[in-house]
Image (tube, grey):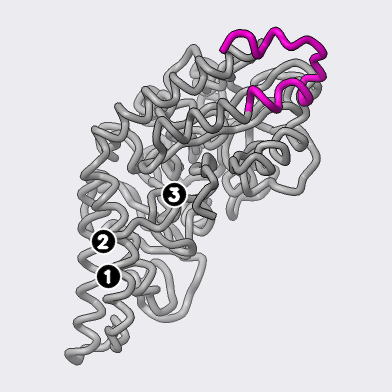
């Protein structure tokens, strides 16, 4: 609906015009990208062009980009026991307590071989505890996300990498929420494996990638069969989706610097407006965050009611990760941060994107002024006198 305001960009993004155009053009390419004839070579060129764009955006080598069906498959492919590490074969997995559900599930690791890395009250991984965990057993694969999908917290990935490297382990970084929003370089991060997803940056749903660092061993394939993706992932490539992914990545990276600054200003405007209306807690506001993400709550607010209320006012927001929708339970991210259930159940996420405007933020704040009186069960009208 044209009169609606979309503030759930961390769940998924609109399809960028560049991605739409690339996908429409790709429809007319008949060939299988594994075929050697002219039609096949044209399809292959679309795949390889996208691979080049994504690799450049992460400072990686194109031949080390493996296309997948999305971020979840990329994570599962990365979380592979038996990888060769400097200290020997990987036998266990260490994951931060605030990871996405597809990482917390542990990929192909035995649950008995998985340990959780705690975070501090702001949601930042505890480096001291990680160091102790690394020293307390055989070589480990460590998985720490670049940016949290609920709070927007940016993890100290390069510091994590230093600890992992010192212990002779391997580092996987889920960069699905960070790629295209903040500058990233696989070498500067010190990551061995990086997961990406197209639909978080304006590409189509159902396509992602695992990017391998220059020194890491090839992970064991999840899908076996043909020799596609250099034998790393069997199955005919999704040419249409990959073409859209590449175009979206190119557009996101071209506008990254300006979007990062503009969205940071809009986020600050939004949070200031929320606080003017009521006593609001913005989670993780004291540490570096994505420029587009606000997770907030207020006393007596119920997230489910708030999301419905905003929706009725024409504003799309969420109560946390879209992958957990329908689950009436507190966020595992907030739980790991030590936030009690009574507070966590009121958390609402607002996330912005490249087409979000000041008018959109003002519409959201207008809805918040109206909803706060009922959501917070306030009987006084002094809140309205502030405007």
**Count of marks, rendered view:** 3
- First to last magenta residue range: 368-387
The secondary structure type at the circle numbered 2 is helix
Q: Residue at x 49, y 19 (%)?
A: 127
Q: Which residue is mark 3?
A: 200
Observer-nearest of 43 and 137 = 43
The secondary structure type at the circle numbered 3 is helix
> How many residues crowd mark 2 within 10 Å: few (<14), some (14–19), many (20+)?
many
Q: Residue at x 59, y 40 (%)?
A: 315
Q: Is residue 239 above or below residue 30?
A: above
The x and y percentages for residue 264 are: 37, 25
Looking at the image, is mark 3 or mark 1 earlier in the sequence? 1
Give the CA separation, mark 1 to mark 2.
Answer: 6 Å
Quick check: marks 3 and 2 in contact, CB under 8 Å? no
Quick check: marks 1 and 2 in contact, CB under 8 Å? yes
Give the CA separation, mark 3 to mark 1.
Answer: 19 Å
The secondary structure type at the circle numbered 1 is helix
Residue pushed farthest bottom? 37
The x and y percentages for residue 331 are: 70, 33
Q: Residue at x 69, y 33 (%)?
A: 332
Give the CA separation, mark 3 to mark 2.
Answer: 17 Å
Q: Residue at x 34, y 74 (%)?
A: 239
Classify the position of the C terminus by image quarter: top right
Q: Which residue is mark 2?
A: 51
The x and y percentages for residue 281 are: 63, 15
Looking at the image, is mark 3 or mark 2 earlier in the sequence? 2
Q: Is residue 316 above or below residue 14?
A: above
Q: Which residue is mark 1?
A: 47
When asked about the image quadrant of residue 168, the answer is top left
When asked about the image quadrant of residue 344, the answer is top right
Q: Is residue 218 above or below residue 129?
A: below
Residue pushed farthest left? 38
């Amino acid at each position: 609906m044209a009169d609606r305001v979309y503030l759930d960009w961390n769940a998924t993004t609109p399809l960028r015009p560049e991605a739409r155009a690339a996908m429409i053009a790709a429809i007319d390419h008949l060939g299988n990208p594994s075929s050697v004839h002219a039609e096949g070579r044209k399809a292959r060129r679309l795949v390889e062009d996208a691979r080049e764009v994504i690799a450049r955006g992460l400072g990686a080598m194109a031949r080390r980009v493996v296309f997948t069906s999305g971020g979840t498959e990329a994570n599962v492919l990365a979380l592979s026991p038996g990888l060769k590490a400097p200290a020997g074969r990987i036998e266990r997995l260490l994951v931060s307590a605030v990871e996405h559900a597809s990482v917390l599930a542990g990929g192909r690791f035995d649950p008995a071989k998985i340990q959780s890395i705690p975070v501090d009250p702001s949601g930042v991984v505890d480096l001291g505890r990680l160091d102790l965990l690394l020293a307390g057993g055989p070589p480990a694969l460590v998985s720490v996300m670049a940016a949290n999908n609920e709070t927007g917290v940016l993890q100290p990935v390069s510091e994590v990498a230093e600890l992992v490297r010192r212990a002779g382990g391997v580092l996987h970084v889920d960069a699905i929420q960070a790629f295209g929003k903040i500058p990233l370089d696989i070498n500067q991060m010190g990551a061995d494996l990086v997961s990406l997803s197209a639909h978080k940056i304006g590409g189509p749903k159902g396509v992602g990638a695992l990017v391998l660092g220059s020194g890491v061993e090839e992970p064991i394939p999840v899908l076996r069969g043909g020799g596609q993706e250099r034998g790393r992932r069997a199955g005919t490539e999704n040419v249409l989706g990959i073409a859209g992914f590449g175009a979206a990545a190119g557009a996101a990276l071209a506008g990254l610097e300006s979007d990062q600054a503009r969205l940071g200003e809009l986020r600050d405007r939004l949070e200031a407006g929320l606080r003017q209306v009521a006593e609001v807690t913005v989670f993780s506001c004291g540490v570096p965050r994505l420029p587009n993400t606000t997770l907030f709550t207020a006393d007596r607010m119920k997230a489910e009611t708030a999301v419905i209320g905003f929706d009725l006012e024409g504003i799309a927001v969420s109560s946390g990760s879209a992958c957990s929708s329908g689950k009436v339970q507190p966020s595992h991210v907030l739980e790991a941060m030590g936030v009690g259930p009574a507070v966590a159940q009121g958390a609402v996420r607002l996330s912005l994107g490249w087409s979000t405007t000041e008018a959109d933020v003002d519409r959201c704040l207008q809805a918040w002024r109206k909803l706060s009186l009922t959501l917070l069960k306030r009987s006084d009208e002094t809140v309205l006198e502030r405007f």
